[in-house]
Amino acid sequence: MHCWSYLLLCFVRIVLTLLPQTGYIHPDEYFQSTEILAGRIFKLETYTPWEFNTSLPIRSMFLPVLTIGGPYSLMKLAKDWWNFDVLQPYLLLTIPRIMMTALSFLSDMFIYKICLNNNTRPWSTLKIWASSHVTLVFLSRTFSNSIELVLFSALLYFVSSSMKLTDRYIRREIELEDQYKKAANAVERVNIVKMQKKIPLHKYNHSFWIGALFALGVFNRPTFMLYALVPMFFWMQRGMFLKKVGLTDFHDRMSSLVPTFIVMAMVIVVSDTLFYRGWSQMTVGQVVMTPLNFIAYNMDQSNLARHGLHPWYLHSAVNVPMLFNVLGLGGLYLVSRALVVVVISPWTSKPNLFDFNGLLMFSFAVPLMALSLTPHQEPRFLLPLLVPLVLLLGPFLLRRHGFSAKAMRSFWYAGNVVCVLFFGFFHQGGIYETQHWLHRHIHHERARGTHTHLLYFHTYMPPMSLLALPHRTSIVNHINGTRYQRGRTVFFEDLGSSLQLEELRQRCARLVEEAQSKYQSTKLMTEIFVVFPATISFQMDRLLMPLPTLRWKHVHKSYPHLSMEDPPDFGDLCSKNLTVSLTDIQCNSIIPWLTKKCNQMALAVYQLQFLHR
């Protein structure tokens, strides 16, 4: 039953990726991967964030180039060789997400293998894993945190597998030693020695993969060091509590990780240096070490203040429950209970915290506590914690019976459905549809030679790659063989949410003056579009009404779009004209109110129309 449920949820994951999901979780899902690579590979107009400044970059592009650059390069080949029209918003958005979804299934495989190795129910665990909104939504997005989760799940698999093998072989060694001492004659001792020699070597089991994963994880996100700390410690100390492994073995295992780490790190450093500097600057003094740059940047408190400072308890109090639902609450409870038991229990009866469950619990607790000490906290920083939580509590959630267990399961499924809808479709959901509409307008509908100004107000920064605008320095080849440099015809401004309405009005007025002046001198037409949440349409109408030379025309709306910076006001439900009594439900008041609120959950595109005099 759980197996079929899991397979159905896998199908849902794929369908949600292909729809596509219109929700926009955070700008980093575009501006730390797809925007950079789309600009490089397709020579499109994109915005390059400060993290990718060639003088001091803090983001490694090794894994994004492998996971996203590869499919984009194949699309480029299809465009160049077979003239396929691949520069469509749907393909530019969905192809990278398909790759990320494929990577997420690697985590499914590792979780399945971990369950088999540790006698845990694999299908019930995978059912909980696949029903999480983190799996259904976040892992299909091009976040470095999503790749971090996949690497963390792989690390947990190799570590837990090594622990299982070491425990089995050491117990076998102890058993044979006891038999050797009790052997009655030399023949039995010889046979026992032969069996001892057949025990496989396990001291450095999986050291190659663990060292490589550590390098990949650190260069992907230096915070991976916090996630890898517990698993790598468990890998190095395994067997110590059976009195067969000492500190020498601990240090030898630590040293065994160094060669693979260094080789993988060198490969990544060379690839990053080529990406940012090119062959001409491939010298020792010009190498790019993104993890060091990342750490140096984040050690400066003033840099973190630009991104927002948060209280230390935000992760535990808000982000863990929001991301992991009842699993997060259960994880916090288990950690608290374990701390109490360790403190109050006598030394001789303290629980064994270095088994498989201890690995999972510490892999949840230690990164959470470490990340809580950093002043800048975002929910996606905690995505890898889903893996130990699912392995630790997933089977428990489905195995329990009774009212409380049913209530927890209902809360789990209902909460994840709500979060899939919110993060997957509603949150800033109109931006993709708006970019799709603008792409069609710019490439197929606007008059030839027209200049277009796009003003985005009170929205997340839109991904410009979805408009598929050729870079202004790119050379265009015509059928007749002529070559020329294309001038820029689309101008983009992200005004953010801090700009005041009066400042926006002044900016629009200046653009109109510039457009009229340009028309008088060059006869070039100009169109101006303003994109903003429909919740502020009333203020925008009042803003531009005093301008007699302008006409404010609504041209497009994208649904659904929910901006938490400008949410619909539901407080007027309790106003006098909407009072609903138990005996007389005023549907004629409620229905218009609901219609109004639904209309507000949209992203509006208005055009400033003016005379070209």
Image (spheres, rainbow, N blue to C red):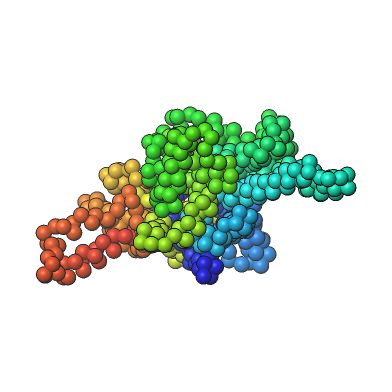
Left or right: 447 in relation to 356: left
Q: Is residue 309 left or right of residue 553?
A: right
Q: Is any atom of residue 452 visible in this view?
A: no
The quadrant of the rendering that contains the C terminus is bottom left
Q: In the picture shown, does residue 491 fall above or below 51?
A: below
Up/down of 200 relative to 51, above or below = below
Of residue 549 and residue 290, the one placed in the foreground of this image is 290
Where, by quadrant of the figure, is residue 265 drawn?
top right
Q: Residue at x 67, y 46 (%)?
A: 167
With 217 as the anchor, is 442 left or right in this view? left
Q: Furthest residue to the front?
A: 184
Could you tell me residue 158's position as x and y percent?
A: 65, 48
Q: x, y percentage for residue 464?
A: 48, 53
**Residue 321 visible in the displayed image:** yes
In the foreground, 296 or 399: 399
352 and 111: which one is in front?
A: 352
Q: Residue at x 49, y 34 (%)?
A: 346
